[in-house]
């Protein structure tokens, strides 16, 4: 039993105390796993190997050529670590400083995955928008996107979560000008109250955030737009929550990720003298925003009725159906042959079933 990841990095003694754990690996030391397993029988267990994540020693790059059978989308991590110090977040202490994969390595990896038949490439990172800021010469996320779009055969490129400050005019123009970049963005908010944002040490205020989201909504039609929100941050008053709710209602989000605040040992927020929001009130606020998110998601799915959408077929569903994903992050179930898996096809939306759209596959020949 091997345990790795953020929890193993930040609290290795607690992980090592779990019965049955043989190896505890920090996030900096995961590449050592094959060598450790080779002679594990000779070692005292549990073996704990957790180094300093701020030690900037070169770390090996593992080429990624394929995912487990059944995957139709490929996830490429181009950046790790974070240079921000949000008061509630333990991630910088679990992942270290921001580090970007050199451009040639990313290009080679995406080329290999496209050649292997993956129709969609998802760029990921702990602080994805900071990509290239630590490289020499410096690069930007927009420059990376433009270079990847030059790869022959690339059908779709999706960006994961990006902080508001990284949406430069260059990045917005790059996304808007290229239909192969998915019309789906996730822009964390956390709070709509400036007082709380300052306590969280977030690098923006509510006005700047609103202006960005309004621009994205106006520039990218039919955008699937999500955000993260924390309820019950220490000292969050009723007026702060009301400001957050009002901002969420005013902006064109299509889904919300709502989290209840919880202390993380070692973070500034865990030591704040501000009064704690009563647990029952935190649950009430969380439930209220989740209802808002569910209503937004339903309205966005209903707005697709009658439209013809291109989907990437992800998997086989129930009773001979297939499940596909649109570029604006909606799942669609429709009847079709299993031979379409990992392929793109067009589907006309006809209904809803839970959180999935229902549709009929459009015969290309008939449509033409």
Image (cartoon, rainbow, N blue to C red):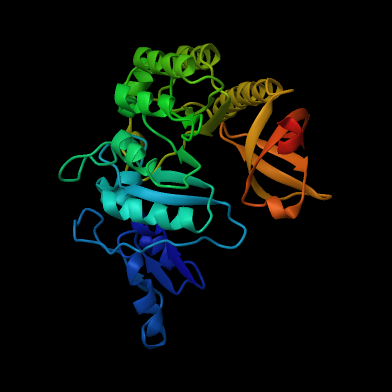
Q: In this view, does 46 lie to the left or right of 71?
A: left
Residue that protrudes farthest toward the left in the picture: 136
Task: Give x and y (percent) for residue 183.
Answer: 51, 29
Task: Give x and y (percent) for residue 37.
Answer: 40, 79
Task: Give x and y (percent) for residue 76.
Answer: 42, 51
With respect to residue 188, does 40 lie above or below? Answer: below
In the picture, which quadrant includes the C terminus? top right
What residue is rendered at 35% in x and 64% in y?
62
- The front one of 338 and 279 is 338
Please identify the quarter of the rendering in which residue 237 is found.
Answer: top left
- The front one of 189 and 261 is 189
Is residue 134 visible from the viewing direction of this image? yes
- The front one of 134 and 171 is 171
What residue is rendered at 52% in x and 17% in y?
248
Residue that protrudes farthest toward the right in the picture: 319
Q: Is residue 276 left or right of residue 201?
A: right
What residue is rendered at 61% in x and 27% in y?
290
Q: How many labels does the image show?
A: 0
Q: In this view, does 87 lie to the left or right of 120?
A: left
Task: Give x and y (percent) for residue 150.
Answer: 37, 42
With respect to residue 238, does 54 lie above or below? Answer: below
Is residue 354 visible from the viewing direction of this image? no
What residue is rendered at 56% in x and 31% in y?
328
């Amino acid at each position: 039993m091997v345990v790795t990841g953020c929890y193993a990095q930040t609290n290795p003694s607690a992980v090592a105390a779990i019965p049955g754990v043989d190896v505890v690996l920090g996030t900096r030391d995961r590449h050592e796993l094959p060598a450790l397993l080779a002679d594990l029988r000779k070692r005292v267990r549990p073996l704990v190997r957790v180094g300093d994540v701020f030690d900037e020693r070169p770390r090996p790059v593992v080429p990624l050529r394929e995912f487990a059978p059944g995957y139709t989308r490929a996830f490429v991590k181009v950046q790790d670590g974070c240079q921000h110090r949000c008061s509630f977040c333990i991630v910088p202490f679990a992942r270290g400083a921001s580090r970007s994969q050199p451009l040639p390595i990313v290009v080679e990896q995406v080329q290999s995955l496209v050649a292997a038949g993956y129709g969609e490439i998802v760029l990921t990172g702990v602080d994805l928008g900071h990509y290239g800021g630590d490289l020499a010469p410096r690069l930007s996320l927009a420059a990376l996107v433009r270079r990847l779009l030059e790869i022959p055969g690339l059908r779709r490129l999706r960006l994961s979560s990006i902080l508001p400050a990284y949406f430069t005019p260059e990045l917005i123009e790059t996304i808007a000008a290229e239909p192969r970049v998915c019309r789906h963005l996730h822009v964390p908010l956390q709070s709509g109250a400036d007082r709380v944002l300052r306590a969280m040490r977030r690098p923006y205020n509510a006005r700047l955030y609103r202006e960005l989201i309004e621009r994205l909504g106006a520039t990218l039609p039919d955008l699937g737009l999500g955000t993260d929100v924390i309820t019950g941050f220490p000292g969050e008053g009723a007026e702060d929550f009301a400001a957050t709710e009002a901002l969420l209602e005013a902006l064109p989000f299509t889904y919300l990720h709502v989290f209840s605040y919880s202390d993380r040992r070692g973070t500034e927020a865990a030591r704040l003298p501000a009064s704690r929001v009563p647990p029952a009130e935190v649950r009430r606020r969380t439930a209220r925003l989740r209802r808002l998110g569910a209503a937004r998601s339903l309205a966005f799915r209903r707005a697709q009725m009658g439209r013809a959408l291109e989907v990437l077929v992800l998997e086989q569903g129930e009773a001979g159906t297939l499940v596909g994903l649109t570029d604006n992050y909606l799942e669609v179930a429709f009847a079709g042959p299993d031979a379409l898996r990992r392929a793109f096809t067009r589907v006309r939306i006809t209904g809803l079933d839970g959180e999935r759209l229902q549709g009929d596959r459009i015969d290309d020949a008939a449509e033409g």
